[in-house]
Structure formats: structure tokens, C-alpha cells
Amino acid sequence: MTLTIDPDQAPAAAAALMNDILPRVRSAPGFITGYWLEPADGRGLSIVLFENEEQARESTPPADDWTAPGVTINGVEVRRVSATAP
């Protein structure tokens, strides 16, 4: 997921992430792990891994369902993991 974050609302957006979004993502069927990268120049990036593509697609909400102050969702993609490294 790619995001645009208003720097003036970043603290409120971070609070929404911790208090609302993360609990919902963690409880999604097939959730393995997630990474929410610190914004750079107002752009955010998150990567969430699920056990399979179907669970990832079912857990991807409509963009207007995931709201946080000052955050605009620019895009959501579902991709297969082709390789990992410990």
C-alpha cells in the first residue's frame, strides 16, 4: 500500500495506525506479518504478508474503509512473494 501523509497530521495518523488499523490487520485471516515504513517526503509504504493470495485479497479493504487523519491511500497491490532472506 502506498500512502500520502500530511506532515501536520502525522501524529494523529500514527495514533490511528496503532489504535485502529494494526489491530484490524493482525486479526485478519492468514495474517503473517506487516511492515509500516516511516514516511519519506510525505509518502508512506506498508507491506503486509498473508499465507496466500486469496487471504490477502479478502483482507484488502476498500480505500475509504481505512481512514486516518491526513492520510490518502494512493494504491494497493497484491503480489506473490518470490524470495525471502532471513
Image (spheres, rainbow, N blue to C red):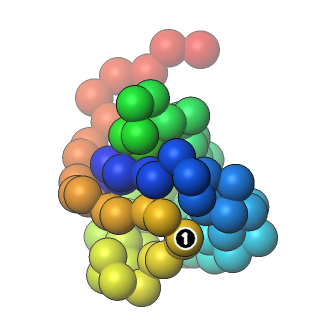
Q: Is residue 82 left or right of residue 45?
A: left
**Left or right: 18 in relation to 37:** right
Q: How many marks?
A: 1
Vertical relation: 57 (above or below) 5: below
Label 1 packing within 10 angstroms: few (<14), some (14-19), many (20+): some
> Where does the image place residue 44, in percent across and percent down from the top left?
43, 42
Q: Is residue 49 visible?
A: no
Image location of residue 66, percent across then percent down: 46, 77
Outermost top residue: 85
Instruction: Identify which residue, 75 or 72, lies in the foreground.
Output: 72
Q: Residue 8's spot in the image, x, y percent?
A: 56, 52
Label 1 SS: loop
> In the rendered structure, which amino acid carries the disc numbered 1?
Pro
The reply to whether residue 5 is visible in this rendering is yes
Instruction: Please provide percent x and percent y for residue 54.
Output: 31, 69
Residue that badge 1 annotates: 69
Q: In the displayed orientation, state which residue is furthest to the front.
A: 8
Nearest the viewer among 71 and 2 is 71
Q: Residue at x 42, y 85 (%)?
A: 65
For the point 24% across and 46% down, the residue is 79
Q: As displayed, is residue 49 above or below residue 19? A: above
Quarter of the image with the C terminus is top right
Asked if residue 18 lies left or right of residue 52, the reply is right
Identify the residue shown where x is 52% and y is 46%: 7
